[in-house]
Image: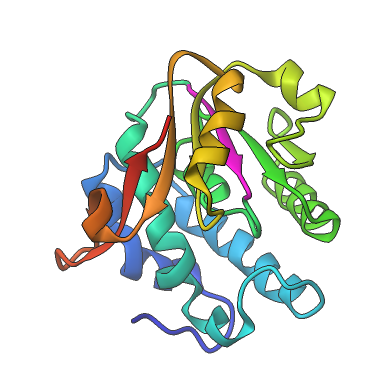
Amino acid sequence: MTRFPAAPTAEGIREALGDIVDREGGAPAGWESRMADFLGLLIRRNAAVNLISRRTAAEVVDRQVLPSLAVLKLIPPEEPLRLLDIGTGGGFPGIPVRILRPQVRIDLVEATRNKCRFLEECLAQQGWEEARVHWCRVEAPTEDLTARAPFDLAVARAVGDDERIARSATPLLRSGGGCWAFAPPAEGDPFHDAAGTPVTALRRID
């Protein structure tokens, strides 16, 4: 477990995740700094808004970023996809994925207004004018979310009720698009850390 007493540094992120990022197709130069900027903002704002568990904030790279990287298996480098992140919370997996796959357009769905304000601040920090935050539940999409459809790919992490999520997300997907949920490693296609240990899995639910 990689622990950071304060916000992770670019160097620490590269040490913790670099081999995995390289294994999954690499990323643009400077991705470590972008990730550090995002996580620094997350940790600062987490003091006022419950974005992630405060007990595990020092382990944010292992507990939040690393599992998010499982989505890279669904997105070939350079392929311009439209990704819908359902119940994104503090921006996982959508923001790390967009940092590593800058050709992907992300739409973040979150039902808690304070979290949406934080996510909007993250998008502004990164300079992603094409990305959007949607304050709603996927079961009751806003007009703006519907207008942004169809999406190529939808992902849901720690949302629960896969059947409900799939039923709500499918109308927002293009024909042939996929909806995926995170699951324990034994319940789907496992994603491994640099040592080969399974840390999470993806399971198609549509």
Query: Is residue 86 part of the magenta span, yes or no?
Result: yes
For residue 66, side relative to residue 40 (left or right): left
Query: Observer-nearest residue: 92 or 13?
Result: 92
Q: Which residues are magenta?
A: 81-87
* 60 in relation to 189, above or below: below
Measuring from the top left, give residue 168's x and y in whole percent: 61, 31
Measuring from the top left, give residue 122's x and y in whole percent: 71, 52
The image quadrant that residue 55 belongs to is bottom right
Residue name at image x 81 percent, y 29 percent: 142
Query: Is residue 98 part of the magenta span, yes or no?
Result: no
* 143 in relation to 63, above or below: above
For residue 199, side relative to residue 130 (left or right): left
Residue name at image x 33 percent, y 43 percent: 203
The quadrant in which the N terminus is found is bottom left
Q: Is residue 108 visible?
A: yes
Query: Observer-nearest residue: 91 or 102?
Result: 91
Residue name at image x 48 percent, y 84 percent: 4
Query: Observer-nearest residue: 145 or 32?
Result: 145
Q: Residue furthest top?
A: 175
* 151 in relation to 33, above or below: above
Measuring from the top left, give residue 97's x and y in whole percent: 48, 44
* 136 in relation to 160, above or below: above
Q: Is residue 105 visible?
A: no
Count numbered badges in the picture: 0
Q: Main secondary structure of the magenta part?
A: strand
Measuring from the top left, give residue 109's x and y in whole percent: 69, 42
Residue name at image x 62 percent, y 71 percent: 52
